[in-house]
Amino acid sequence: MKSAFKELMFPLIAVVAAFLVGGIIVWMVGDSPLLVYELFFTSAFGTLDGIGYTLFYATPLIFTGLAVAVAFKCGLLNIGAEGQLIVAAFATAWVGLVLPTWPAAVVLVLAMVAAVVMGGVWSGIPGVLKAKFGAHEVITTIMMNFIAVGLVSYLTQYHYRKVGDPILETFPIAERVDGVLVGPHIPRMSVMLGWIGISFPDRLPLNLAFILALIACVVVYVFLWKTKWGYELRAVGENPSAAEYGGISISRNIVMAMFISGMLAGMVGINDVLGYRYRYYHDFSASYGFTGIAVALLGRNHPGGVLIAAILFGALIRSGLFIDIFTDHVSKDWVVILQAIIILFVACEAVFRGRWKRA
Amino acid sequence: MGEPKFAVEMRGVSKRFGEVLANDNISLAIPDQSIHAIIGENGAGKSTCMNILYGFYTADEGEMLIDGQPRQISSPGDAIKLGLGMVHQHFMLVEPLTVTENIILGGEPTSGVSIDYAQARARVRELSEQYGLKIDPDATVGGLSVGQQQRVEILKTLYRGARILILDEPTAVLTPQEVGEMFAILRGLREQGKTIIIITHKLAEVLALSDNITVMRDGKVVGNLPTKGATAEGLAKLMVGREVLLRVEKNEARPGEPVLTVRGLTLRGVEGNTVLSDVSFEVRGGETLGIAGVEGNGQTELIEILAGLREPTSGEVLLKGRSIAGLNPRRRKLRGIAHIPEDRHRRGLLLSFDLAGNSILGVHRESPISGRLLLNGSVIVERAERLVNQYDVRPPNVALPARALSGGNQQKLIVAREFDIKPKLILVAQPTRGVDIGATEFIHRSLIELRDAGAAVLLVSAELDEVLSLSDRVIVLYEGRVVGEVDPKSVSEEEIGCLMTGVQPGEAELGSRRAEGQGRSGAGEHRNEV
């Protein structure tokens, strides 16, 4: 218990310190830090709308945070979550577009599988390159990001876009007909809670994907800490020589870890394409892949921590708009600055840990 | 009459790390121009004490005097200015750079803006001649032998004007011949006015080399005595606090059927060099075969091949008549081969995992440790607790991370894990390196018990005493070839030394000269082994 508390301490200090520094910045531009803090809490957590949006924005970050965390547990740095979620999202939409006549439920399942498989493959390729040739995954995953954007943009622009549409997006895979959504899609929270008699505003985009994200957290935890495959993966990340001594295949675990990581990143596609926009929409990702790295770092590569960190970042995204509107001088970039300061403090933590031990 | 001058004095020094009192009221006095040994088990506090002297840590209480003057030493920079120099057990050298570049690192002589290499080289050459530390200033450090690298480390301290040298486990990495050379160097330095402090656990060397001894136990100084008149048994008793069985007592071996058969094992390295050449031997159940040899003659690779961590170029390995070629370590373990690796941190442990997690390494896929999908947490913990109690691993808390344990306890954990499979064959490499006397005693006894129960034991150790006292038969490996088999009970030091260094027995030069004064008398007796 004591060590769990110690583990939580540093991320907590980083966040509190970042907020303090953020408050100083607010004060320097002439607004009240207390007002900004208040806006943060009330807009993100104070209303049902707030909570709804916060969790909606947090959903993709939970996926990418888990993705980076799993890879990291195997000693790998997956910088390619962005590219993985882009190809996954496109694949999801593509399934819906090429099978318009099939039953929506079947297409839905296939689309979800496509998201997960595409994401896994996109990450698995760098995994194989590392296992077989020792190619550093940081370089290969970043390169795959560029390929992903280029490939998907091309396909969208020249093959799957409505003629005359000024926005770079594909045809929709599901549309409202007489107020009812027709086509493969995952239900919104309003619909799901409606099944059990709870009323929830339909305007909130929070959907099934959030539940999937929570399930993913549990599954990742159980996999990593309660199964022999997770044990092997973590052993490879901790000490490949000792893992080899224990009869564990290093190359197989590298590929597996990258694949699983990509699968998790790919699930972002489910949230956006099947749960929100019902099409592939260029630039739909607000840097989820890269923010996922920050989330994993803050969450210390543990599913529980990732969940909390993702919600925090989701809250920052949500409150950014409100802070922008309801203050005179602070813009929504403030939340981006805050994110950056949090990351800086978390990164510095290693230094402080060393000092603590020596004192 | 003048008082004897003390180069270093520590009075009432204490240091606490959280709950642990690492140094408890330490008082010692090191006479000028002497060789002083500080001995103690792992965790006794000797490294902490010297790290305080060298400024890595600051003491909570007490004072230190250098050359009779009380001094504040809050950083290694302060220590260096006062004439202290430290050579660590794990060298701090930059391998791609040359000897000169390493020595001047951080204190480069300049002429204008650029480094004056000519001056640096000259100074290095001057120092190396003055102190008998023969080294080529332009050699690349990465290409030097371990003994030569150590000389560079010593030169580094001398370059900065050190008069008091602190050496942490200086002979841990040296071959027997290099140990003799190191002793000559240290005596030479003493003649030239230096004061030498060595932290070590090797009692025989302490008795041969030092003038005075400080014994530490559990953070306290339990003895300050002159070396003259001290005995290994007496020192061991001070270190451990009880009578220590320094002799390995074992019955005659009763070997049965062959368990391990190695035929024509050959290994060629990536550059085409021969690492192992036509190695053949047999180990029977109920006997211990020792492999003697200077490190680097193929022993490491031989054990790795037998453990399944490396493929041989050619040759056969049979376990009870069946070939085990192509089997990975896990499958070999299932066949009954246990392996205690020579580098426990690199090969044997997952340091940030807890003891329970480490106790299943290698058997983590087997039932009942793992079910079809999930690991059986309670089975794992119960088994880990049983092992920890059976093999006296301290502290017996299976939730602690492995890195929290001392070297000896880590080794006992590995022994526990490997022996638990009731192996038919045990591959043991350097079992007591960096391990304290108590744990060494335990591990030796465990190996003998297992051998008496019918297992075949293959032992590789750089500690000749250990090999000779634990083994029933000994073969010598030199440049990848088996150059001879000897009877550990009757072989002479000269004979085995010659085999180990490739010299034919009977030729003039004594190949393996170990520390002066060190001897081995009688069957089954061995010294120190901490």
Image: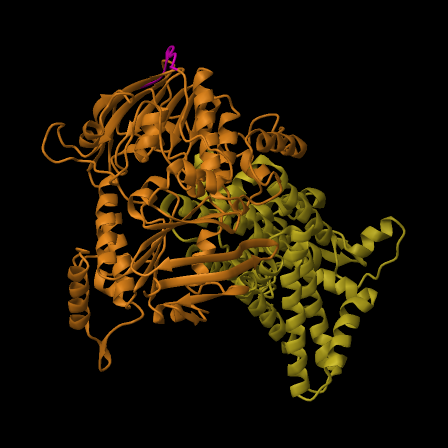
Chain colours: A yellow, B orange
Asked whether B25 or A297 is in front, the reply is B25
Whether residue A252 is visible to the viewer of this picture, yes or no, is: no
Q: In which quarter of the image is residue B164?
A: bottom left
Horizontal relation, residue A223 to residue B123: left or right: right
Residue B68 picture quarter: bottom left
Q: Can residue A9 be seen in this view?
A: yes
Instruction: Identify the residue at the far left of this view.
Output: B508
User: How far across and how far down the image is residue B338, in percent?
Assistant: 44, 26
Furthest residue toward bottom: A30
The image shows residue A277 at horizontal and vertical percentages of 68, 60
Q: Is residue B283 above or below residue B375?
A: above
Q: Position of residue B18 (x, y in %)?
A: 60, 57
| Residue drawn at the location 39% of the way across and 30% of the way down | B428
Q: Is residue B65 left or right of residue B486?
A: right
Residue lying farthest to the front in this orientation: B1
**Left or right for A214, reference B363:** right
Res B188 quadrant in image? bottom left
Give the quarter of the figure containing the C terminus of chain A. Answer: bottom right
Compared to residue A315, the image places residue B521 above or below, namely above
Q: Could you say where residue B240 lies in the image, as x and y percent from the top left? A: 49, 40
Q: Is the magenta stretch mostly helix, strand or loop?
A: loop
Q: Nearer the viewer, residue A160 or A237?
A: A237
Q: Which residue occupies 51% across, 36% down?
A: B242
x 36%, y 55%: residue: B88
What segment is highlighted magenta in the picture? B252-261
In reply to whether residue B51 is colored magenta, the answer given is no
